[in-house]
Image (cartoon, coloured by chain):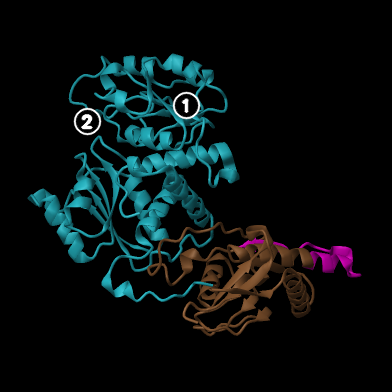
Chain colours: A cyan, B brown
């Protein structure tokens, strides 16, 4: 794997292999010494142009558990506020010797620009770009579902036949986009429920079915209900009359939770607006996987960084590969 | 290129049985013994040695506390020194027996001992998992050409080879057959 920019680039085999590596990484997290030397001497830069707690901390923890050196960069308090361009920032990082750049950017496609421009040779990981994609979130969601459904027998398996309903602000959600493709690639069926104003143009090209009624979706008894955050910071127009009306129509409240099958999972990528898209009762119920998603996030990001950074780099000095390890 | 069989199924079984007796002899019984196989074939070999040990110990007279020998798997992928020189390796599961390895005698089990680098990585991996009382090494085949000061305590067969030859260990559980073959060099 050279970069991780979009879940649409992942084949089924590659995705399952990545989830399997994450299983091994999860084992590391249960040990007394939560550290392995796989990426010793590598430098990972967290390049965050947008605010984030869990994704940045998660990537930082993942890189440190693999013994990589981590440089955290946030746009606030950097030369970006003096007008530095993405190109100059990238070239600065290249000059420092970054081996991987984890980028979160408000503009969709910024990670792709970084990967294709030739400004920097490092592996690029998309940690969320605008309203485009957030591949590691989708991977950790798939990992969480697989672990809950199959337990220790998860290795090597996809999500065939699993029904997943994604509810809420599909329009602004990069999580929904990444999940729609990844979960479908893994064999699941994805159903999307949202008010018509929060569905993007061209939703018919997505590999999903679309509905507008949460009660009908709940009655269908999906294996997983994934609630999305209402992204008020990206909403510059009125997409629904009032928060209370949204909550009543499309929020997962205690009453709808009770109507879900007892085995259904309730997921949320965080941060949650309790009382808006999800009630406190649903968020804290045993069906909720919110905290599991966070701890699984570290395992997934370790797997991504490992697959990105280990292995032979095409440098002239490594041409003298010895024929060892042939045993 | 021809492959010559150097160990048949019966030879492998005999070698593993002898190794098992040697392990018991040096450990004075099977107390506090943990076998850790190195994936992939080492794990299968470790299970077989574990079964043989159980058979020997339950047959002995002091069978009052015939505790079964614990067998696990130790993946060393993340500790290798050649991660940057090869295509990305997928790790295998590590399974440490309940009770851990602290204060135990750990016997590492692998199929072939060659450069010694895998064992070096295994020693580092063990270091992160606990502090055993002692670490021993059992291998089915020792083919020489060590690059590190590492030696095996229990060896199934010493096979002097040239570095251009190739040793193939096939194990019933993984390859469907039990045999060790040696392939001549391409230039020969």
* Residue B56 falls within the magenta-colored stretch: yes
Judging depth in this view, the residue of A149 and A311 nearest the camera is A311
**Which residue carries the number 2 mark?**
A234
What span is in magenta? B53-73
Residue A61 rendering spot, x and y as whole percentages:
39, 54
- Give the secondary structure at mark 1: helix
Residue B8 lies, with reference to residue A266, above or below; the image says below
Where is B98 relative to B158, above or below? above
Q: Which mark is residue A282?
A: 1
Residue A313 lies, in percent from the top left, at 32, 65
Find the residue positioned furthest to the left.
Answer: A83
Image disc number at residue B71: none
Q: Residues within 10 Å of mark 2 (few under 14, many from 20)?
A: few
The quadrant in which residue A98 appears is bottom left
* Up-down relation of residue A116 to residue A107 (above or below): below
Q: Position of residue B51 (x, y in %)?
A: 76, 63
Side of B63 where B181 appears, left or right: left
Q: Check chain identity for marks 1 and 2: say if they share one.
A: yes
User: Gap between marks 1 and 2, in whole Å?
Assistant: 25 Å
Quarter of the image containing the N terminus of chain A? bottom left
Quadrant of the frame with the C terminus of chain A: bottom right
Report the front residue among B87 and A39. Answer: B87
Q: Is residue B137 visible?
A: no
For label 2, the SS is helix
Point 61% across, 64% down: residue = B41
Which residue lies at the image location 35% right of the left edge and 51% below the top edge?
Answer: A59
Q: Is residue A233 visible?
A: yes
Q: Nearer the viewer, mark 1 or mark 2?
A: 2
């Amino acid at each position: 794997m050279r970069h991780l920019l979009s879940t649409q680039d992942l084949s089924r085999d590659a995705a399952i292999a990545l989830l399997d590596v994450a299983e091994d990484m999860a084992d590391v997290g249960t040990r007394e010494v939560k550290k392995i030397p796989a990426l010793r001497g590598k430098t990972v830069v967290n390049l965050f142009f947008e605010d984030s707690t869990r994704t940045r901390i998660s990537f930082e923890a993942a890189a440190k558990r693999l013994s990589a050196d981590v440089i955290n960069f946030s746009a606030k308090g950097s030369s970006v506020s003096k007008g530095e361009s993405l190109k100059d920032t990238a070239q600065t990082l290249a000059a420092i010797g970054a081996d991987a750049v984890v980028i979160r950017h408000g503009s969709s496609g910024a990670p792709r620009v970084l990967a294709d421009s030739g400004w920097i040779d490092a592996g690029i990981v998309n940690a969320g770009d605008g309203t485009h994609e957030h591949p590691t979130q989708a991977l950790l969601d798939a990992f969480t579902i697989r672990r809950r459904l199959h337990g220790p027998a998860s290795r090597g398996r996809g999500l065939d036949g699993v029904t997943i309903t994604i509810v809420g602000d599909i329009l602004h959600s990069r999580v929904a986009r990444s999940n729609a493709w990844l979960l479908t690639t893994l064999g699941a069926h994805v159903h999307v429920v949202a008010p018509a104003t929060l569905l993007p143009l061209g939703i018919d090209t997505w590999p999903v079915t679309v509905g507008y009624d949460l009660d009908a979706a709940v009655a269908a008894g999906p294996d997983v209900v994934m609630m999305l955050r209402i992204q008020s910071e990206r909403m510059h127009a009125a997409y629904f009359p009032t928060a209370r009306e949204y909550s009543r129509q499309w929020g997962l409240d205690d009453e709808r939770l009770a109507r879900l099958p007892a085995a259904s999972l309730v997921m949320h990528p965080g941060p949650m607006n309790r009382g808006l898209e999800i009630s406190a009762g649903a968020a804290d119920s045993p069906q909720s996987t919110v905290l599991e998603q966070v701890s699984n996030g570290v395992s997934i990001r370790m797997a991504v960084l490992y697959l990105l950074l280990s292995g032979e780099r095409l440098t002239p000095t490594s041409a003298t590969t010895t024929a060892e390890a042939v045993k | 290129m021809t492959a010559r069989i150097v160990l048949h199924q019966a030879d492998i079984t005999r070698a593993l049985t002898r190794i098992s007796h040697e392990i018991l002899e040096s450990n004075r019984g099977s107390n506090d013994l943990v076998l850790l196989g190195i994936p992939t074939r080492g794990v299968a070999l470790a299970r077989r040695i574990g079964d043989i040990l159980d058979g020997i110990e339950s047959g002995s007279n002091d069978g009052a506390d015939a505790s079964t020998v614990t067998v696990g798997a130790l993946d060393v992928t993340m500790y290798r020194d050649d991660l940057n020189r090869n295509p990305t390796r997928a790790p295998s599961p590590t399974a440490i027996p309940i009770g851990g390895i602290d204060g135990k005698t750990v016997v590492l089990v692998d199929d072939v001992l060659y450069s010694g680098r895998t064992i070096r990585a295994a020693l580092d991996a063990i270091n992160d998992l606990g502090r055993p009382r002692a670490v021993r090494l059992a291998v089915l085949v020792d083919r020489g050409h060590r690059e590190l000061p590492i030696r095996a305590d229990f060896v199934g067969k010493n096979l002097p080879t040239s570095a251009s030859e190739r040793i193939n260990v096939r194990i019933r559980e993984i390859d469907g057959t039990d045999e060790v073959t040696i392939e001549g060099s391409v230039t020969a």
